[in-house]
Amino acid sequence: MSPSPSRSASTSAKPSPSKSTGRPSPSPSRTSSSPAAADLSVTYSTSASWRDGFIAALRVTNNGTSARDWTITLSYPSGSGLELRGAWNATASLSGNTVTLSGKSLAGGSSVSVGFQAEKNLNDLVKPITCAIGGGSCRVS
């Protein structure tokens, strides 16, 4: 059962007539608290893979007009047994099966290629099961 709409406690004894112009009245506009958050996007791919390791290549793009810091979070399947061996153009850290990459001051309208090399326990190709960048979009290919 949904709650009933609330009603104002005070009412006017004489309702005033309204005049219709045939045009809808303007609605107040809503703005997001951080409109720039959706300006960032990232594309992930595995550029090389072998029995016990792989290289991840990512392209981070700032579609906005202002420089932005960025953080990417990649979660891999449990049992992957990841160990980072190096990263480029980003600061990388590993916690369990989650790799976090971050960078500073990516200029508006530009992009950067980043990546990392990791060891893995699985013989199969390992891809992230989730990929996120601070409010923007992330695509795994």
Image: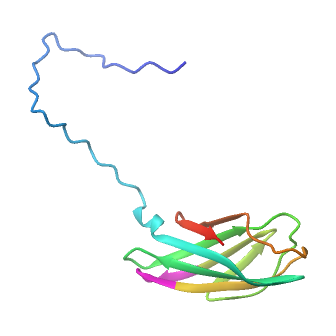
Which residue occupies 19% across, 37% down? Answer: 24
Magenta portion: prevailing SS class: strand
Which residue occupies 46% across, 77% down? Answer: 62
Front residue (pair 46, 40): 46
Residue 134 image point, x, y percent: 55, 66
Which residue occupies 34% across, 19% down? Answer: 7
Residue 109 image point, x, y percent: 41, 81
Q: Is residue 107 magenta?
A: yes
**The N terminus, quarter of image:** top right
Q: Is residue 22 above or below residue 90?
A: above
Q: How many marks?
A: 0
Q: In the rendered view, does 23 fall on the left or right side of 105? A: left
Q: Is residue 29 above or below residue 9?
A: below
Q: Is residue 45 above or below residue 11?
A: below
Q: In the rendered view, does 95 fall on the left or right side of 122? A: left
Q: Is residue 46 above or below residue 16?
A: below
Residue 22, located in which quarter of the rendered image?
top left
Residue placed farthest to the top in the image?
Answer: 13
Q: In the rendered view, does 119 fall on the left or right side of 14? A: right
**The C terminus, quarter of image:** bottom right
Residue 46, located in which quarter of the rendered image?
bottom right
Q: Is residue 64 magenta?
A: no
Front residue (pair 68, 113): 113
Residue 110 image point, x, y percent: 45, 84
Front residue (pair 131, 3): 131
Q: In the rendered view, does 57 fall on the left or right side of 70? A: right
Magenta segment: 103-111
Which residue occupies 9% across, 19% down? Answer: 17
Image coloring type: rainbow
Residue 132 image point, x, y percent: 62, 66
Residue 94, located in which quarter of the rendered image?
bottom right
